[in-house]
Image: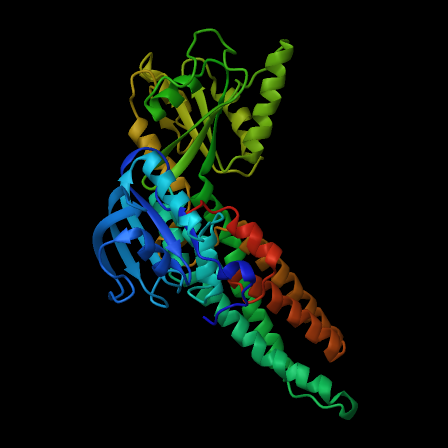
């Protein structure tokens, strides 16, 4: 990538703790900028870093005047062959908070300033190390907590998503340039861009964008987890099931119906997918005002969920009642897992529900059927496209830009159908290009960059 325009602040030499704060065996302080090597050399007694080869490590001491602050290992990365494409030093010192504080203060007294959140990655982007979508993937990689989130971030960081956007823009730019050329010869009424070819191209690009947009449902789940509501009548065993799934006493278990009047939420990872389980108030008619509020909120939670586990007691639920309840739940159009609980009390009751397909029978109290339920939950989440390596959109900013780009292409298609002037057509295509360019950073503003990199941790 070509370097982006820089400001005065970008010329500073910056430093920050790159490892987690707190006491540890080792702490790493990262320094980047034109003065990274000379400033470090002033406080480092060991190898002459100015003459040392790049990508080498050197043992020595950090000194504040005659006072030895610590024994350290200095890693040297000379630009442009570094993460930021500037000269970079990483000082590995002992993980004492006192040592880290003293070392940073020593660097500041020698003309270095503390880095802002994400400033190292921002410099890497500004220096053309990678595009904006790849930079954002670095933050996703740092915060990834599951296999699926890790794979999605790695794919984006290695340029999978950026390559898709680049191909779309290149195809549009070719036709956009021809239409712009037509505008220069507007008085001569000539057409350089074949309208039928342009229409076919826009349809194809729109198809790809539609696919990327639809992948956000999966991408959002990968990044934020699957919100899974556990619903059912009071005393169906919802809280017991939650405790069994999480393998801890997270929810209150009581024989008194209506004990859970609000929401209990916790997470677990199944086969690389994070599920956010929400235990809710029991569904029933109630004269208790507080419980009634909880039941209404339960219904709202179910409508917002990505997955619903409907739990019923096989001993106290009739076939007719289950049929009525499932009819309402299916009207939400949300994937539904139906679970019959308490088979340890009377397994023969299962026969009553033989006309229902796909019911999983368990005993939450005895931990029977739990593994089958877990496997079913994983199957219910459609990660087929993701697992084949297809590009998945996980970033809401990218999602919004894709929607705006698609809307501009829709307007361009309408312009073509209506025979509208090339000037308005060109404007729609320009808009689509701008929104695609915002994803990769080919079109940027200081406000956009400030908002993105402010969400990074300091030291990255």
Residue 411 at least partly seen:
yes
- The number of discs equals 0
Residue 460 at least partly seen:
no
For residue 192, above or below residue 250: below
The chosen color scheme is rainbow
Image quarter for residue 422?
bottom right
Q: Residue furthest front?
A: 66
Q: Position of residue 65 (x, y in %)?
A: 32, 46
Q: Residue furthest right?
A: 187
Query: Which residue is at a point 41% across and 12% down the rendered structure image?
Result: 253
Q: Position of residue 252 (x, y in %)?
A: 43, 13
Q: Residue furthest top?
A: 256
Q: Relative to residue 340, is residue 178 drawn left or right?
A: right
Q: Relative to residue 79, is residue 422 drawn left or right?
A: right
Query: Which residue is at a point 66% across and 65% down the rendered structure image?
Result: 408
Q: Position of residue 87 (x, y in %)?
A: 37, 62
Image quarter for residue 345?
top left
Q: Residue furthest bottom?
A: 188
For residue 425, above or below residue 77: below
Residue nearest the observer in this picture, 95 or 216: 95
Q: Relative to residue 335, is residue 150 drawn left or right?
A: left
Residue nearest the observer in this picture, 355 or 100: 100
Where, quadrant-wise, is the N terminus in this rendering?
bottom left
Q: Position of residue 332 (x, y in %)?
A: 57, 35
Residue nearest the observer in this picture, 386 or 40: 40
For residue 459, above or below residue 5: above
């Amino acid at each position: 990538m070509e370097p982006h325009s820089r400001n005065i602040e970008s010329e500073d030499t910056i430093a920050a703790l790159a490892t987690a704060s707190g006491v540890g065996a080792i702490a790493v302080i990262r320094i980047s900028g034109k003065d990274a090597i000379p400033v470090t050399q002033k406080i480092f007694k060991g190898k002459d870093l100015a003459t040392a080869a790049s990508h080498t490590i050197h043992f020595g001491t950090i000194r504040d005047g005659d006072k030895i602050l610590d024994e350290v290992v200095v890693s040297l990365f000379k630009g442009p062959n570094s993460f930021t494409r500037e000269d970079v030093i990483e000082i590995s010192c002992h993980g004492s908070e006192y040592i880290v504080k003293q070392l940073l203060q020593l660097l500041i007294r020698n003309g270095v300033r503390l880095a802002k959140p994400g400033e190292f990655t921002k410099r890497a982007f500004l220096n053309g190390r990678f595009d904006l979508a790849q930079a954002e993937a670095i933050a996703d990689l740092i915060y990834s907590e599951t296999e699926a989130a890790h794979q999605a971030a790695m794919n984006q960081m290695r340029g999978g998503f950026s390559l898709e956007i680049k191909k779309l823009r290149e195809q549009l730019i070719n036709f956009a340039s021809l239409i712009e050329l037509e505008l220069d010869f507007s008085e001569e009424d000539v057409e350089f861009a074949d309208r039928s070819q342009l229409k076919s191209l826009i349809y194809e690009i729109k198809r790809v964008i539609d696919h990327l947009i639809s992948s956000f449902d999966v991408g959002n789940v990968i990044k934020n987890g699957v919100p899974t509501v556990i619903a059912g009548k009071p005393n169906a065993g919802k809280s017991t099931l939650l405790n069994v799934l999480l393998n801890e006493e997270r929810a209150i278990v009581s024989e008194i119906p209506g004990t859970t009047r609000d929401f209990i939420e916790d997470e677990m990872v199944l086969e690389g997918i994070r599920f956010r389980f929400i235990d809710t108030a029991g569904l029933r008619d109630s004269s208790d005002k507080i419980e009634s509020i909880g039941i209404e909120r339960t219904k709202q939670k179910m409508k917002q969920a990505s997955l619903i586990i409907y739990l019923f007691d096989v001993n106290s639920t009739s076939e007719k009642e289950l049929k009525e309840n499932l009819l309402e739940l299916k009207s939400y159009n949300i994937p539904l897992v139906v679970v019959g609980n308490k088979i340890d009390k009377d397994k023969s009751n299962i026969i009553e529900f033989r006309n229902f397909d796909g019911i999983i029978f368990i005993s939450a109290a005895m931990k029977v059927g739990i593994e089958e339920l877990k496997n079913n939950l994983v199957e219910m989440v459609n990660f087929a496209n993701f697992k084949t390596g297809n590009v998945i959109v996980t970033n809401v900013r990218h999602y919004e830009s894709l929607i705006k780009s698609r809307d501009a292409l829709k307007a361009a298609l309408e312009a073509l159908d209506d025979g509208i002037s090339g000037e308005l057509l060109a404007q729609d295509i320009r808009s689509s290009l701008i929104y695609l360019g915002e994803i990769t950073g080919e079109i940027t503003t200081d406000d956009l960059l400030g908002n993105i990199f402010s969400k990074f941790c300091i030291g990255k």
